[in-house]
Image (cartoon, rainbow, N blue to C red):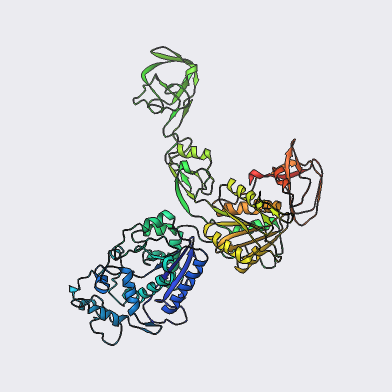
Amino acid sequence: MSFDKVIMVDWSGGNDRGASPKKDAIWACISSAGTAEEPIYLRNRQLAEAWLIDTLKTLQSAGHRVLVGFDLCFAYPTGFATKLVGSEDTLALWDWFEARVRDDPKSNNRFDLAGEINTLFPGTGPFWFNGLSRDIAHLPRKGLDRTNDHGLSDKRAADKAIPGSFSPWQLAGAGAVGGQVIMGLPVLSRLRKRFGNSLSVWPFQTPDTQIVLAETYFSMLPDLVADDPHPIKDASQVSLYARAFSALAFPDLAKMMDVKATSEGWVLGAEHADILRNALAGPPPLRNDCFAMPQGAHWTPVAEAHQHLRERLTCVVGTEVLPLQEAAGRLLAQNVQAARSHPPAPNAAVDGYGFAGPAAEGISRLKLVEGRSAAGTPYDGIVPSGHAIRILTGANLPKGVDTVVLQEDVGTTNAEVSFHGPLKRGANARNAGEDMQAGQTILQAERKITAADLGMLAAAGVGSVTVHKPLRVGVLSTGDELREPGDAATTGEIYDANRPMLCALLASWGYQVVDLGRAPDDRDTLRGILDSAASQCDAILSSGGASAGDEDHMSALLADTGSSALWRIAMKPGRPLALGLWENTPVFGLPGNPVAAMVCTLIFAAPSLGVMAGGRWQEPTRYHLPAAFTKTKKTGRREYLRARIEEGQVTIFPSEGSGRVSGLSWATGLVELSDPAQKIAPGDLVTYIPFNSF
């Protein structure tokens, strides 16, 4: 029942509206995963029908599953269809209208047909409102001119469930929907015939086909539409509802579609405006120019590239509420406050005897009260002055007690305890809230929740937290020369090392990894893979094809989107880095050599993905350690050397070649050499970054 494409259509019963965009016309919008494309103005029904057919054919051939929502009544109140087609078969009623409606861009017969339909019913009605200057027999101009003996309800059950909805019998006037219903049902009928068994109509048919048509209503979230900056309300509506329905989680959409079908149909989203509103509460999409470097930039220093990404990238995932047991490793979306103080009441830090302190120097003797105070079963009485009570670690201090003496320091009889002073007031006792106060912020948003955090949250009475949904990261390798590890390969072919390496790395960072497989050096094939990946991923890491050669298809495709940047990073390894948005999904085009691919992932993708996942820009931990190697470095670029620590010194891999993937397995981290020229001798301090600090 899930859809990777959603189309929302605002229909119209009027004539051609002209070339320039206007209100009360037909508008449509395509959306995927909560991100809508620019609303499309369709000046008449003929153009709209052709656009729908072409668009659905394109999406169908690309393998997309599509929900098409129309702001158009799919059915009439009970009894109407029976009079026209002999049964309450709503889809047969669509065909009835399709056979009788005459429509061209400048005129149509909706008012005349409504008058003819009225003659089939007793009295006057049900249709009303003649929008023409000439009179039409049996079609009253005012609703009050009708009689009620036509026997039909003024609204369907679905209409009654939505405040402010209009009756399908009113053909025109402000807010009326009747005319567009008559002019829309023939189009729906033809769409059914065109796409056959690959199309179904909800709720009259099971929505398990590639294309599903559904009725919706574009006034369920009027405040959000009003806040949209688009100057034409119809455009705002299709954009808003396309985003909302495409952002719905599967359980929410299933809940909306779980209705008992009747001949009157239902409005998708009716009585669930709150779910639609929540779906729209996710993060805004990335700006189309988020990767574009300033004009004239050629060689980009690593620090400048980092600053650029840090300023432009934002969180791209929504939120959900999870119980503590499921929250480990997730990024907090909201600050967390202590639900109660910890400890909630003054308590004992040790096993011993509680009394009202302080105790003077010398021997103190205190009478014992009956009973004791234990964790979970506090003493309910008052301990008088000059008395003591048996108390266990973690137990609440009874009234009259503020100090505890260790049991090892006490002599006891059945009637009293004695111990040597002095002992200051409050010794061995904890104050209420000395660890955490009720209402105090104990964890900040953007923090990744650790096991220790869960213990603290539980102690503070927090049962659930609002976290970001897991970032879904696709991993793709490109190149005709690649083969799967273990398969037969010629000497001119190589095994794909990048994909298993990067998939494992991303999984270790807590992301939901989507293995996108291998793409050949074919632009059309790669385009199709990216189209599919954009619907199921929040970010894509691709290796190979990121430079500017004849076979560098990734950078070429990203350039076609108008959102790309081919960064020439002043670093070694990993100079070329192609960045861009594919259907608003960020793509990191990494170099094909495994070492360069890994280093670019660590240096650029790691902090970037952290921000997109809802966290902070995270710098790795750097250590200054003595070198066990000699190195001369030229000025102008930053270098990263595979390294590990041996006997307290940093050793580097013998070869700096990007193709030497064995060096990644040998290393435990990287030596980072800054941009200026350097000469490093054994014993000089160098910057070492462990792999596990990324």
| 113 with respect to 417 (left or right) | left
Total labels drawn: 0
Specify the quadrant that holds the N terminus: bottom left
- Classify residue 142 by image quadrant: bottom left
Taking the view exactly as shown, the residue that stands out farthest to the bottom is 134
Residue at position x 52%, y 60% in the image: 535
Closest to the observer: 502 or 83?
83
The answer to whether 457 is drawn above or below residue 134 in the figure is above
User: Where is residue 4 drawn, in percent x and y?
Assistant: 48, 61
> Seen in the image, is 84 located left or right of residue 673?
left
Q: In this picture, is 265 found above or below 678? A: below
The picture quadrant where one finds residue 143 is: bottom left
Instruction: Tell me if residue 97 comes above or below residue 536 in the rendering.
Output: below
Question: Can you give x and y, in whole percent of width and height, for residue 218 in the image?
Answer: 38, 67
Of residues 122 and 401, the one nearer the viewer is 122
Q: Closest to the observer: 467 or 124? A: 124
Say if residue 361 shows up in the picture.
Answer: no
In the rendered image, residue 583, in percent from the top left (x then y), is placed at 55, 64
Visible residue check, residue 523: yes
Pinpoint residue 475: horizontal percent, then vertical percent.
60, 54
Q: Nearer the viewer, residue 666 or 96?
A: 96
x 77%, y 50%: residue = 656
